[in-house]
Amino acid sequence: MKKIRTGKRNGNFNIVRITIFLIIFCVAVLQQVSYGSPDTSQRLQKPASRREIKKAITQINSSEAEAVRKAQQAVGLKGRGVRIIATSPSVADICDRLDLDLVGICNSTVSDMPKRYKNVSVIGTPMAPDMEKTASTQPDWILSPRSLQADLQPKYEAIHTQWAFLNLDSVQGMYKSIYELGIIFGKQKQADALVEKYVDSYMSVIKLNKGKKRPKVLILMGLPGSYIIATNKSYVGNLVEMSGGDNVYKDSKKAFLTVNTEDIKKQNPDVILRTAHALPDEVVEMFEKEFKTNSIWKHFDAVKNDRVYDISYENCGMSANFRYINALKEIRPMIYARSRKEIKKVKKVSKEANKKAKKSHGKEKYDKQKRGEN
């Protein structure tokens, strides 16, 4: 969970560099507070208690606790306000809810940044921050999603700053990260309030799902010109599990898979959900063309039964965020819709998501970013 190193900043004094992996072991946690075992049962198990749900978020092992303690100590030694950069919209939103000031944020073609950071320096995109701009803000900490750790960690080390990669692959992981950040940056009151609100939401979802049969769900994550399969290890896969669905593609490690349509057909999902990773305006058009021109889709029961839905890209993207409640309210009715009336109702929601994606101007925003315009 942690690495502690000694390094030099500005070449004139030693500092303790503490690198915290704010990573929840999702498999272990989901077993404790599970909606059921997707591999062995089509029925939801007896739900966990409120205490168990909260414990899964707030309980950390000794090595994690030591790493958090040292990070907290390093922040305290600054003797001033800590300078933090958030490199994704979800991370910036977490910082906002924790009442943390930032010196740098990313720009995005998909999400808006919290208003409190409107005058903060923009340091590039989530996947490719401009390291010259990043270094110019003189950050003490850089906070990023762990999904980008392999690419970004070497860059952060090159500018001699402390960093943390947050687990935003699941709602549970996000709140575990929030809990630890609250300790590190002296925002425990805010973190505790957020965790309590999460537990309330989780309990409500469990009650809705109790005793329900779990429909089989296929999740397509769209990219401009192509798509990948979202597994149970992805954020949107986590949303489907929380909604009571059984993801037809599971993996012990990978959040996304590339699978051919013949293999997908063998899974015969009851429901197909489509969302976008980036450039949602291009992605929805790509999906429409794919389902109209690729004849294999007409053999899917989900297509025959008109149970193919577009879900909101801003609620159901790559990283966990506080809009997960809206996402669950959107996804769950889609998964459980059976009657014509129910399907008609969720189809209307799907069409609204499709329409909003087309009006997102993602391609236009992306082109502006390429030209260096914010």
Image (cartoon, rainbow, N blue to C red):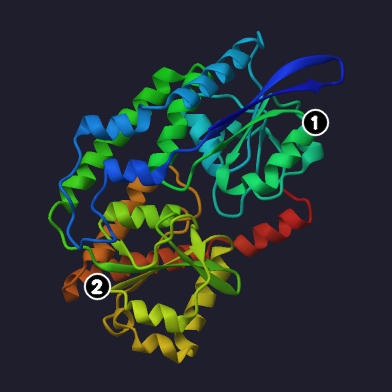
Which residue reaches farthest left? 211
Crowd band around label 1 with a 10 angstrom C-alpha radius: few (<14), some (14–19), many (20+): few
* Label 1: element kind: helix
Relative horizontal placement of residue 47, taking residue 26 as reference (left or right): left
At a point 18% along the width and 72% down the height, the residue shown is 338
155 vs 303: above or below:
above
Crowd band around label 2 with a 10 angstrom C-alpha radius: few (<14), some (14–19), many (20+): some
Return the residue at label 1.
136
* Label 2: element kind: helix
Q: Position of residue 137 (x, y in %)?
A: 75, 29
Q: Give me the disc on residue 336.
A: none
Foreground mark, 1 or 2?
A: 1
Which residue reaches farthest bottom? 295
Q: Where is residue 333 in the image (x, y as percent from the top left)?
A: 24, 61
The answer to which image quadrant residue 194 occupies is top left
Depth check: give the residue in front, 186 or 53.
53
Is residue 168 in view from this perspective?
yes
Is residue 315 in view from this perspective?
no
Label whose residue precedes the other's in the sequence (1 or 2):
1
At a point 69% along the width and 40% down the height, the residue shown is 153
284 vs 208: above or below:
below
Return the residue at label 2.
344
Disc 2 residue type? Lys
Q: Position of residue 63 (x, y in %)?
A: 49, 25
29 vs 294: above or below:
above
At a point 36% along the width and 27% down the height, the residue shown is 59
289 vs 311: above or below:
below
Q: Position of residue 52 (x, y in %)?
A: 24, 33
What's the distance in space between the residues labelled 1 and 2, CA to CA?
Answer: 53 Å
Disc 1 residue type? Ser
Relative horizontal placement of residue 20, taking residue 354 as reference (left or right): right
